[in-house]
Amino acid sequence: MAAGEVNSGEFRLEIIPGNEFVDFPPGPSLLEVLRKSRSGREMAAPCGGKGTCGKCRVRILSGDCREPGPEEKQSLSEQELKSGMRLACRLFPSGDLTVELQSSGEAAVLVSPVAFGGVVSPLVRKQMILLEERDGKSQLNLFDQVRKVSGIEDMVFSGSAADSLSRLVQLRERRVTLILDGNRVLDIESGDTSAALWSFAVDIGTTSVVVSLVDASSGKEIDRRAGLNRQGIYGADVITRISHAADSVEGLKELQDSITLQIGEMMEDLCIKNGIRPEKVNSCVLAGNTSMLHLFAGVYPLGIAQTPYVPVFTEALHFAEGTGPLGSSPFGKMVTRLVPGRSAYIGADITVGIAAVGMDMQEETALFVDIGTNGEIVLGSRDALVSCATAAGPAFEGAHIACGTGSIAGAVYSVVFEADTGRLKTGCIGGGAPSGICGSGIVDIAALLVREGLVDGKGRFLAVDKLSSSTGDELKSRRTTIDGEEVFLLSPASESAHGSPVYFSQKDLREVQLAKGAVAAGIETLLNCRNMAVTDVEMVYLAGGFGSALDPESAFQIGLLPAELKGRVIPSGNTSQRGAVYYTLSGDFRRRTGKLRESLDYLELSFDKGFSRRLMAHMYFDIPRGI
Ligand code: FES
């Protein structure tokens, strides 16, 4: 039996690529079997296995399976079904199978090294002390002696600290180092170890997860790991995952196990690569949206999905060493802290994001826009900040888009039409053949359709004979139909990575219209509630992987951002990851983030009278004159 085999059932699944074998009992869907495998655990399943998104495609290479059901016939073309393509969530194996995964590529998650230039005052710190000589003159017990020489009168000690102290004194060690979480001694080490202080800073995004290893004594982030959030197999957006948590007793546990296991593996990997023993890591800070932090903590998040949208917690949750979701991992000596958020939809990722770009301290009026499955928007300056969250939908994450995908190898991330050569140029992650389109590519295509007049102001695809004579032949040749749907073809089946065409459809453009309309209407509603004009905004921080990969020109072209803000956009990268690192390192940053939890205003758009009207208005496009 090869490495990676599991032997616990009656049928056998062989997964290609990956050369993995999984034995399983009759009953579960292929998606459920794949969730438990190494190769399939990050497979996209945006609708959470309900058979409606068509993204959990696999190709059956051999084996028994029943005829395709109605959902599969709806999502897959006849040609695809003939080639063995099936939906893993709708296929219930009745025997051994060999399957080929369609999207097992590594995630190209945006991560940039984090630089911290402030005063280092880490969450967990070290202090070297010199214990008094045991000459019989002092009558102080050991705890009081440590309190006296450290200058921390209200110091309390953990059980490990008491054990270590008694052992070190027996060994006649006088120079010792306290590991301190506030006034609590977590442990005591022999000698001066104050230069060796390690922490993790984690960003749990709905789509991706980033773990940074931080040298908390020098204030440097020394390494990082990133990957797609493995909870994606339970649904692309938070609402689908919350409903998975609600569906069964195991649902919440599955979601929590999925994220804690993933983070634990990334941490172990970082420790091995950097030669650090897991028990030497003293703290872990986690930022993320409110739903992700609830699921990490194993707290049922149903209130987030139902009006009036009340989460269980938004404050900084604290887990002492050896407790909490990561307490029984090899990192049992680490304290875990969840960063405070503001509300159900303005989470810790946004509070640390605002503090990371410094918006809470700056005089100029700015906008902070983080577009993912939700669009979180903050407006203001150091005087006052107001926020809102729009249900942008997962279109910009590639979900609900026929050929949409995450930022994985093969994803088309950029589409440019060169007017002088009349050629369409596409950029593909990894440089190979295209397999799908990720968020920035989706916005580029929508912008191209608008700019070149292939759609009208309402977003309707124009028939080829209705296109302007100035529309080039290359663009016209790409306007076609596939399975009766109006599409813009990016790659024919013969040139794609998986033998199926890669295209952008009329339905896809409708999803983009909803998403861009929601973000633009959110911006306008915030401006309106503060009696501001868009010209009052002096800068726009575009946060998140999507925001940073986005071509601002395309965003202006489709009306995702108001045209008046041209030249004011600052791509800001993963501000949540950066904020988590800063939170680990800086007391001032922790204080500012805590203050934001109290002072940041929140506007619930579903209660705003003008929002629906603005949403409708912003779903249209401004078609350039002369087309
Ligand atoms: Fe299978 Fe959506 S169709 S996960």
Image (tube, rainbow, N blue to C red):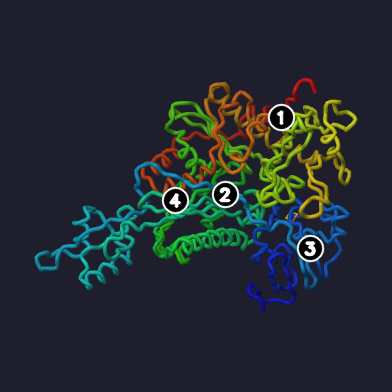
The residue carrying mark 3 is 91
**Disc ID at residue 221:** 4
Specify which label sits upstream in the sequence, 2 or 4.
2
Specify which label sits upstream in the sequence, 4 or 1.
4
Q: Residue at x 85, y 58 (%)?
A: 81
Image position of 571 (left or right of 152) = right
Q: What amino acid is labelled 4 in the image?
A: Glu
The number of numbered badges drawn on the structure is 4
Q: What amino acid is labelled 2 in the image?
A: Gly
Gap between marks 3 and 1 measured at Cα:
39 Å
Q: Nearer the viewer, residue 216 or 232?
A: 216
Residue 309 is situated, as x and y percent measured from the top left of the image, at 58, 43
Mark 3 or 1: the one toward you: 3
- Asked whether the beta carbons under mark 3 and mark 4 sit within 8 Å of each other, the answer is no
Specify which label sits upstream in the sequence, 2 or 3.
3
Mark 3 or 4: the one toward you: 4
Whether residue 297 appears in this view of the structure is: yes
Q: Residue at x 64, y 44 (%)?
A: 373
Q: Residue at x 36, y 54 (%)?
A: 124
Q: What amino acid is labelled 3 in the image?
A: Leu
Q: Is mark 4 within 8 Å of ligand 1?
A: no
The residue carrying mark 1 is 616
Mark 2 or 4: the one toward you: 4
Gap between marks 2 and 3 measured at Cα:
29 Å
The residue carrying mark 2 is 205
Gap between marks 2 and 4 measured at Cα:
19 Å
